[in-house]
Amino acid sequence: MMLVSVLLLAVAFLALGTGALAAGTQPPWTVAVYGGALLLAVVGALVALASLTTGTVDEVVLPLGLPRTGLRFRLDGLAAFFLLVLDLGAVVACLFALGYGRHEPRPRRVLPFVPAFLGAMHLVLVADDAFAFLFTWELMSLCSWALVVSRPDTAENARAGYVYLVMAGLGTAALLLAMGILAGSDGGYAFAEMRAAEREPWLAAVAVGLILVGTGSKAGLVPLHAWLPLAHPAAPSHVSALMSGVMTKVAVYAALRLILDVIGEVAWWWGPVLMLLGAASAVLGLLHAILETDLKRLLAYSTVENIGVIFTAFGLAIAFRGAGLQTGAALALTAALLHVLNHAFFKSLLFMGAGAVLEATGERDMERLGGLIHAMPLTAAAMLLGSAAISALPPLNGFVSEWLLFQAILQSPAVDVWALRFLTPAVGALLALAAALAAACFVRAYGIVFLGRPRSPAAAAGHEVDRWSLAGLGAAALPCVLLGVFPGPVIDLLAPAVATLTGGATLATQGGQGWLSLVPVDPAHSSYNGLILLTFILVSGSLVAFAVHRLASHRVARGPIWDCGYPDPSPATQYTASSFGQPLRRVFGSVAFSAREQVEMPAPGDLGPARLEVHLRDHVWTMLYAPVAGVIDALSERLNVIQFLTIRRYLTMMFGALVFLLVVVAVWR
Amino acid sequence: MALIVELLAQGLQMAIVLALAPLLTGLVRVVKARLLRRRGPPILQPYRDLLRLLRKDVLLADNASSLFRTAPYLIFAVTWVAAALVPTYALGLMFSWSVDLIAIVALLGTARFALALAGMDVGTSFGGIGASREMMIASLAEPAMLLIAFTLALFAGTTQLSGIAAYALTEEIGLRVSLLLAAVALVMVAIAENGRIPVDNPATHLELTMVHEAMVLEYSGRHLALIEAAASLKLLLYLSLIACVFLPFGMAFGERAPLPMLLGLLAWIAKLGLLGVLLAVFETSIAKMRVFRVGEFLGGALMLGFLGTLLLFVSRGM
């Protein structure tokens, strides 16, 4: 029943998208499309919530798709949880788009694809056979690609679209091969048959690798992240919010579903590998973000970090499962899933806030922004909350998932594997580093954009955005507080999703803990209570404010800036985004990016300006992407000859291919 | 009845950390002055400074935003709450379970986040330089602190500070390498986090060497008083943390009885005094380092914390 409503919703989304093809460029069309999508997403969120609370498992087989298999869909706890994330993210983004979308220069390139994109993601989450999964996955990729290239004005956006298309193609190809391995020679393409099938360990390990390439490239896992900071910012901001906040989560879902549920028995060593990849993503993503001056690209790099945190928890869960510690796996997966939900909210909030800034000033370059807290007080307040939440500061939500992950790491000495003994502390250290770097990154982003003095006329002329956009920002900001203060009920809510992956093990029910505390393992071991913390801070803060204002002084005088007595009226004397990042670049950049600084001082007496040049190298790009692209270029150059053969030769080639395939089949069987 | 006693015990700690924090700052200043053969200000001078600042009007820059005006209250409240939740004279106070060591580290991160943003609010180069360097220092000190927390948690089997102190009090521990590493790292982090020499100089107003002072340059009156008080509270917090984890002698635990609590209180004050004097001696005997050497200093703390954790991980089950 619930599954049927999800499918109907998805169809309705796709129909809305198709209908929007006929849409005009007038604002009422925009309102109709986003309003419709908003309503559908609200219904979808309610359905997902109902499914999570009742814990039902639904299956549907439609007489379409592959022969013998049919088109299969299934809704269980895991799918329902991700549906909830998807629909909540969609609600927030559509609410924002009701206002923001009206300023779209080319609405006909955006309107049809947003609902279709949402519909496709709904279908991915409930797909239950290889064909349904791959088809909807590709539909999701193509819709998002269309949105990435919706503004092909600049060469940068066109390149982003190209790189994204290549990476999406690579990802789907890897998933296709993985499905082939999982289906085996008998061709059991339904997930149920794949679950039941016996396969050799090495085949399973290869399949896991291919799945990680496929899903990791969509989620932005290092080293497959290179497209993400290009493509996510190129789309309109509410779509960037959907891509970063939600689509990467669909990829996380696919990884969890295929690896932990469909394959099931995973070699334990994939755990440490994933932990390392995740921790590397977390740190590398943030180091990129700290040096980035484009606001939206900074946010995209921070997505790489958060995906890294999620995959680290995922890897930890595999390691725990390999050692038979299902409760440890449940703790790690709870941390991962909670972070999925948290990140969906704060990253959507931040991308939409960046969109609001872009709308108000026309600028994405942080070096030309500043002082927006005066012109956009409400946007600034929401962004402050989002920046604090993503920096894992208590009592907000980002801290809760980070804390749970640290608790999971502290459980890991129980895993009796030598490699993990060395690795887990290192991964913990990298995550701790990432948490601290995130705070530095977002102090920089927020401080440069919203505080200080305007660095350009455009920033000085900024204005507050419309009410719908503000409603969207508020709707994304509120959960950042609520999830931080009341994490218990949410953790209970996602227990069915965790149980799907751990063979039934979940955390202890949090609802019954005293004072709404969070107690992951044992009250004597660790507990955290955001509610008490928030109450304490609010009460003591207001008490102090009251006492100081009442008993001491409450007068305020305004004067010029002090600045040690020599204030300079030019805003160019402020710290810029680059200068804020300089100490961090000095400390970390020389290792991570081979950063080199070159200062050219004019000769004494020469009045010419001095020059400072900074050279950074993106090792992932130069060591991995550039060589691969070079090899492909060279190969295609060689193979180009095939385009110009006679028909006789083509027929010979077809015959040869047929013989080859028959030989392969004969040997395989 | 028991609830009232518990509430009182918690309230007492909340009041007493606030009351003692300026005294600790005064003590460190006096000892430093004496070591330099100066007479120095009276030990109660920080109280007088705070009262004087509180009575003065606030002079705000023309373009200071609401964030600039609310940040001091937030910074003070968060630091105060964090200091009130670190066990000082007694273990297992009423709300001590609501945050663990990891959360206390993160709470101080919240205060720092607010302070760094406030430093950037007016848009001066000093505010920016302070905020940027503070976040650079924090980006190394915070992970080091988390690794120390890991070491202690693996050691005692809990991340609760009360639990760690109780473990250290009741179990026979002896000399342990990882604890030693963690202790050294914690001292290094405490020095960096509180902006003491050799990382930062709390007494300087020389532009290029300031970190903390550069951020609060635009503050005046009651706002400055709150930020100064928060800085004192943070110093008290870190010294209490060191005392609680590595010198837990005399802390009251179990049933609430007046005598052990009084003893615990005296022991805690004595420990604070001792650590304060040691800090002053250390600060006078070392020179301030260049800002970019701080990375190496804190990188050392990070590696020590990491080694401590690693040793515990490796030695488990052998």
Image (cartoon, coloured by chain):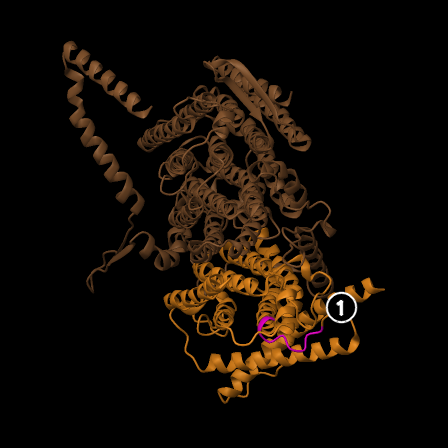
Q: Residue furthest top?
A: A647
- Give percent across and percent down for residue A631: 21, 34
What residue is at 67 percent from the left and 69 percent from the top?
Answer: B18
Question: What is the display colour for chain B?
Answer: orange
Q: Is residue A32 magenta?
A: no
Label 1 crowding class (10 Å Cα cut-off): few <14, some 14-19, many 20+? Answer: some
Lateral position of residue B301 relative to residue A537, left or right = left
Image location (x, y in percent) of residue A199: 42, 32
Classify the position of the C terminus of chain A by image quarter. top left
Identify the element where label 1 is drawn.
Answer: helix
Q: Nearer the viewer, residue A612 or A237?
A: A237
| Residue A369 visible in this rendered orientation of the protein | no
Amino acid beneath label 1: Ala
Residue A518 percent across, percent down from the top left: 66, 50
Q: Is residue B253 above or below residue A384?
A: below
The image quadrant that residue A226 belongs to is top left
Is residue A14 something that shows in the picture? yes
Foreground of the two, A163 or A180: A180
In the figure, the shade used to draw chain A is brown
Magenta range: B245-252
* Protein chain holding label 1: B
Q: Quadrant of the N terminus of chain A?
A: top right
Q: Is residue A656 above or below residue B142?
A: above
Q: Where is mark 1, residue-wise?
A: B9
| Residue at the image position 52 percent from the left and 83 percent from the top | B32
